Amino acid sequence: MGIYGPTLARIDIVMKPATDATPPCVFDYLNHRTFLSDWFSHKQQVNPRYSHRLFARRAGLSNPSLLLLVMQGKRNLTDRTMDGVVSALNLDDDDAMFFRLIVEFEAAASDEKRNSIWAAIAATRRFRDARPLEMGAFELLSTWWVAATHELARLPEFEASASWVAAHLVPQIDESDAQHALDLLFELGLLVRHADNRVEPTNVSLTTPHEAGQLAVHNYHQGMIALGAQSMERTASDARHLGAVTAAIPRSLVPELKQELARFQEHILNLCDASEAPAEEVYQFNMQLFPLSRRSDG
């Protein structure tokens, strides 16, 4: 399995925008601007005379164009305007709470804050019921041992038990985490059990909401980079390779370097897939390209 950007080589993760609903239900959305746009369009279908000015009056807003500007991404909702907007949307308590969460999710300034808000979003029963597979895809990307367990299933001696998985991952994980990973992979259809009780991995396509997908990818890479650093202490040098290059380059070369890295990663995956020898271990291959200086022109 290789993950680069939002894509897994053997498991295709597709960033999927929220689906349309008529009338729109806020629990079908993670982008509050899209929800507002769909909500306003629906209101105009029901009443062609419904206007931004009427919405502003009902929301107690001094700017009659604020809703339009928010939908266009030119303005943000604030604590001062939120209560009025929620009132004009005529949302019940649960819907209003969820709407506030997705507004906060977009506005969060750090991955730590976004993960905290995502936990609150994911804990909402109506959202879980609407998007169980998409939530599973998010967790697959965000939690390193779920992806690693999927690759463990390619080993001939693999056993679909929490004790076996926990004992064979490095660093070792709790059996409760291993069991959760197995349950999730079976639920997503990424592991299947045959009539003879044999378990094997499958190659399927999953979807994850676009807004949460980027966060999941960040979580994945942060986790794997941390594991790479830990490998210097726990893994013998003959079983790992850590390399780095520091170079001064023209900024125009960056796109070409990224393409070269992507081609090399594809080459590595092809080597793995083309090997006729049975799989024996699960390895992680990391590559990073990032600036160490700031341009003098800002």
Image (tube, rainbow, N blue to C red):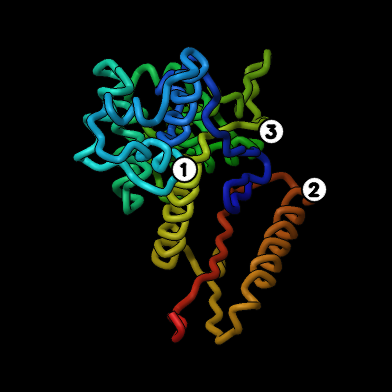
Q: Which of 112 and 190 is in front in this view?
A: 112
In the displayed structure, would residue 183 be above or below residue 173?
above
Marks 1 and 3, how far apart in space?
38 Å
Tell me if 164 is positioned left or right of 64 in this view. Answer: right
**Residue at figure coordinates x 33%, y 53% from the top left:** 110
In the displayed structure, would residue 34 be above or below residue 169?
above
Q: List x then y, in percent, for residue 26.
A: 40, 23
Which element is circle 3 on? loop
How packed is label 3: few (under 14 Cα within 10 Å), some, or many (20 or more)? few
**Dot placed on the residue nearer the N-terminal end, 1 or 3:** 1
Contact between marks 1 and 3 (CB within 8 A): the answer is no
Q: List x then y, in percent, for residue 54.
A: 34, 25
Q: List x then y, in percent, for residue 269.
A: 71, 53
Tell me if 21 is positioned left or right of 10 in this view. Answer: left
Q: What residue type is labelled 2?
A: Glu
How packed is label 2: few (under 14 Cα within 10 Å), some, or many (20 or more)? few
**Residue at figure coordinates x 32%, y 48% from the top left:** 108
Q: Can residue 226 be seen in this view?
A: yes
**Residue at figure coordinates x 75%, y 48% from the top left:** 273
Q: Which of 73 and 57 is in front in this view?
A: 57
Tell me if 82 is positioned left or right of 135 in this view. Answer: left
Which element is circle 2 on? loop
Q: Which of 189 and 167 is in front in this view?
A: 189
Q: What residue type is labelled 3?
A: Asn
Which element is circle 1 on? loop
Give the labeled residue for mark 3.
203
In the displayed structure, would residue 289 be above or below residue 161?
below
Give the labeled residue for mark 1.
72
The label number, if any, that marks residue 276 in the structure image: 2
